[in-house]
Amino acid sequence: MKTFNIRFSLVFLMFFQLGLSAQESNIEKPAIIPQPAEVEWKDDFFTLQERTVVCFNTGAEASAAWLQRLLQNTYTQSYTMRGDNCNGFNLNLNPELEETLGKEGYNLDISSSTVNLEAATEAGLFYAIQTLRQILPAGIENEKVLEEIQLPQVSITDSPRFAWRGTMLDVARSFFGPDYIKKHIDRMAFYKLNKLHLHLTDDQGWRIEIKQKPKLTELGSKGAVKGGRSGFLTQEEYKEIQEYAAARNIVIVPEIDIPGHIYAALMAYPELNCDDLSNIEPKRATPPQLFHGYEVGWSKFCLDKPEIYDFVSTVLGEVAEITTGDYLHIGGDEIEDERYKEFVIKADSIVQGLGKTTIGWEEVTQAAVDSTFISQRWNGKTKSVVKTPIIESICSSFYFDHANVPGQEMTNNWCQERGVSLKDTYTFKVTNPNTIGVEAPVWTEMVLSDEAADDRFWPRSIAMAEVGWTKDENKDYNGFLKRLGAQGLRLDFMDVNYFRSPEVEWNSDPKKGVFSDFMPESKY
Ligand code: TNX
């Protein structure tokens, strides 16, 4: 009897296992990017019912709205309800979880009948929802999915490696308005990026309204690089973008580039020049002309004139007033002047006086700035006299105005002749203990349309998102390429004009989206 029992159990077990593996192969494991810290897939699934309750507790109201918005693109009818534990979707905000999950971490647990999302903050819940979104079928990105939805059961515990996960858009060389910026914010949020740095001013254009200095936009916003768009953001538009971003856990970081890269202000307010114009290269442009070229490093304030500090205080004061984030970026790149260090220290104290944290390009660390000053590394050439927190934007891995593949047209490859490949981005290893995160700039001297900006940002920003979020031991380039390829269709549905990196096997719908016209040469 005993032997029979054991035999029977063995046979039963074998059947059971066979059954499971068959089931398992039916349900593909979704591609999640960035790779979460801990993922445990189970061999069973959750079926989305025709009616669903979304339960949320105090503080999770906005998350409930997000989740309901997501479920709207499925056949389910969802109802939100204040409460702790419903038999359906549960959003649980619990500040005590900060100890284990940090500010942006979350737990996501999908079992046979419930989907539980918990975090210490709404940011964490928002990220749990983004992960859930990646587990739901790609079709929800552009239509109502009516076929039955089965989600694999899973238990995910996740939190980011770095607090700073950003992109930078140069709206000064060529203007990008609220519509594109919001689209960009949506895509960033999907990949758990949380800082959008706007390079608002440069020689070619001034892009943010300053009420006490109206000529900055009346005159200074009219320029752009040849073929690029001009324009500016009103303060109302800026605030609206900022609110849109905040709802997606993204902080807008405004940059007013001083004391160099400042010609747009110098043509609008010529009194900021030295009387003999020794602060600019007149062959590039002289006031009241606009500048449409590409050259850098040829303009600066007249640093001997004390009035420039009034100008700086007024401008930064207004920008600080409309900025809800903690940071003001003062640029500080590509200038030589005896008074440069003095200027940086003074500008920092103005920013601190406005209650914000100062950020500057790495050159600022030639000056003995405070240890709260954040420096943004881009060419790694500065001899720093201080240790500061660092945002990593080293050009050889994170300058996305560079070519996706060698020879790509309309790219600027001064840092690395062959451009910046997906692999260059993905395999960057952060080793400096002062690094607070990563950020990828798209400079727009050669990026003149929304489609081109998409092509430069995506998919390399996705690789960067994983550098910023995922710990080294959980990263793997080949695994990343597979997950990225699997997300192609989703990017199509999201209407992203991403560069079809040749190293990726894209699961993509050629009827959707606009393809980049680049054809790799056979030698690549
Ligand atoms: C360097 S990076 C610049 C920008 C240019 C960019 C082009 C930095 C701080 N300055 O002014 O647009 O190269 O790649």
Image: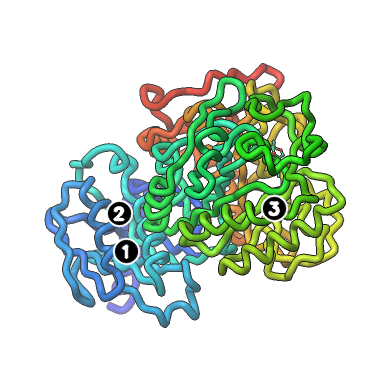
Q: Secondary structure at mark 1?
A: strand
Query: Considering depth in this image, is 103 or 332 the residue closer to the camera?
Result: 332
Q: Quadrant of the C terminus?
A: top right
Residue of label 2:
151
Is residue 484 left or right of 360 when viewed as pictured?
Answer: left
* Whether residue 428 can be seen here: no
Where does residue 303 sit, x and y in percent of width and height? 78, 49
Q: Nearer the viewer, mark 1 or mark 3?
A: 3
Q: Which numbered tag is attached to residue 461?
A: none
Residue 82 versus residue 361 in the image, above or below: below
Measuring from the top left, give residue 442's x and y in whole percent.
60, 38
* SS for dot 2: strand
**Is residue 327 depicted above or below 33 in this figure?**
below
Q: 2 or 115, which is in the foreground?
A: 115
Name the residue: 61% across, 50% down: 439
Q: Which residue is mark 3?
A: 307
Q: Quadrant of residue 365?
A: bottom right
Whether the residue under disc 2 has CB within 8 Å of ligand 1: no
| Real-space Cα separation, disc 2 to disc 3, in angstroms | 63 Å
Q: Residue at x 62, y 54 (%)?
A: 329
Q: Whole-percent x and y of residue 413?
A: 73, 30
In the picture, the disc for residue 110 is 1
Q: Is mark 3 within 8 Å of ligand 1?
A: no
Is residue 384 visible to the viewer in this orientation of the structure?
yes
Residue type for callout 2 = Leu
Q: Are the residues flagged by discs 2 and 1 in contact, CB closer than 8 Å?
A: yes
Q: Amino acid at mark 1?
A: Ile
Disc 1 and disc 3 in contact, CB within 8 angstroms: no
